[in-house]
Image (spheres, rainbow, N blue to C red):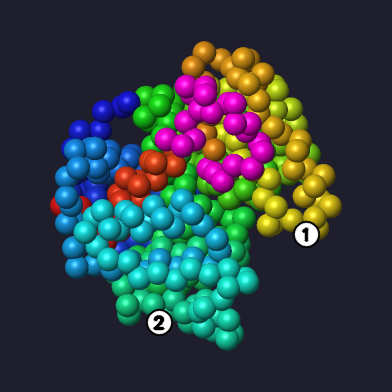
Amino acid sequence: MVEFIGKPSQERMEVFRGRNIIDISSLTRDEIETIMQTAAYYDKALTEKVRLYDMDGKIMASLFFEPSTRTRLSFESAMERLGGKVISLTESTTAQISSTSKGETLYDSIRVVNYYCDVIACRSPIEGARLEISRAATVPYINAGDGSGEHPTQALLDVYTIYKEKDGLDGLTYAICGDLKYGRAAHSFLEALAKFSVKKIILASPQELRMPAEYLAKLKDSNIEIEECYDLDYAVANAEVIYMTRVQRERFASMDDYLRNKDLFIMTPNHVDSFIGDAIILHPLPRLNEITLEVDDYPGAAYFRQAGNGLPVRMAVLALVTGSVK
């Protein structure tokens, strides 16, 4: 892994104090690397079982208006590992417990929650909700996913995983595969790659699930070669980092549309046999059927390690935006 020695300088950390993290496009490469170095600093502390008190006396509001396992638990675990406290609200369309069920706007909800905490991590099923939340938040707000829009901390832990697995991102060829239309993790990962000197990005999807033009437009001024295709076999045989995604059932307007696409891209051990050298496989999870269980035995299947990296990365983001890195 690229060596990130100790925590970043105070000057580099200070640019995050009081800041919202709503997308990847608003972060520079230098800022991303500051987050990576802070994550490595906390990763080392976790490995050595150091008891941390960086967020002692601070409270995080964990607001999840859409189901979540890894993101919610890793945010809450990150706050606890840093010595802070968590107040939590978790609901779905069938189990509503907040005042949004009474018609309260998300804007008003956030305006109230500001008084109860020092930082907010919020997930919404509504694409673009990050903009409304950021306008309402008077404490730092971290976007934990908004519909099919953005998922910045997922992209940050993806980047951190590549640093650990491949010693950096520059000069590599990437294949982002699966549901590129609705997959917010794929959107944010693509934007993150645009900050680095990557060699090539292959965007492989079923024809109905292509990467939206708005995300491709953000790369038009980069020197990165972009190739779109509808062939999983080709994509995985020509990349050193393979990013698989599930078909987002909850985003489809009709079940027929979902069923027509759900089994088109499935990675099997036969694909592994075609890999370039020691290629790695990433996946934001949850996995459905797009990677068969037999692939888990491949040493470069990094998706569970990737999920684990969410803890130090989210510790870094929480501590940086609250100015708490000790």
Circle on res. 199: none
Task: Kindly identify the amino acid type of the residue bearing the numbered disc 1.
Answer: Ala
Q: Residues within 10 Å of mark 1 (few under 14, many from 20)?
A: few
Left of 324 or right of it: where is 278?
A: right
Which secondary structure dominates the residues rendered in magenta?
Answer: loop
- Span shown in magenta: 284-305
Residue at left offset 31%, top offset 73%: 117
Residue at left offset 60%, top offset 19%: 272
Position of the N terminus by quadrant: top left
The answer to whether any part of residue 128 appears in the image is no
Residue at label 2? 112
Residue 139 drawn at (x, y percent): 33, 70
Label 2: which secondary element:
helix
Residue at label 1? 253
> Is 217 above or below relative to 320?
above
Left of 116 or right of it: where is 323?
A: left
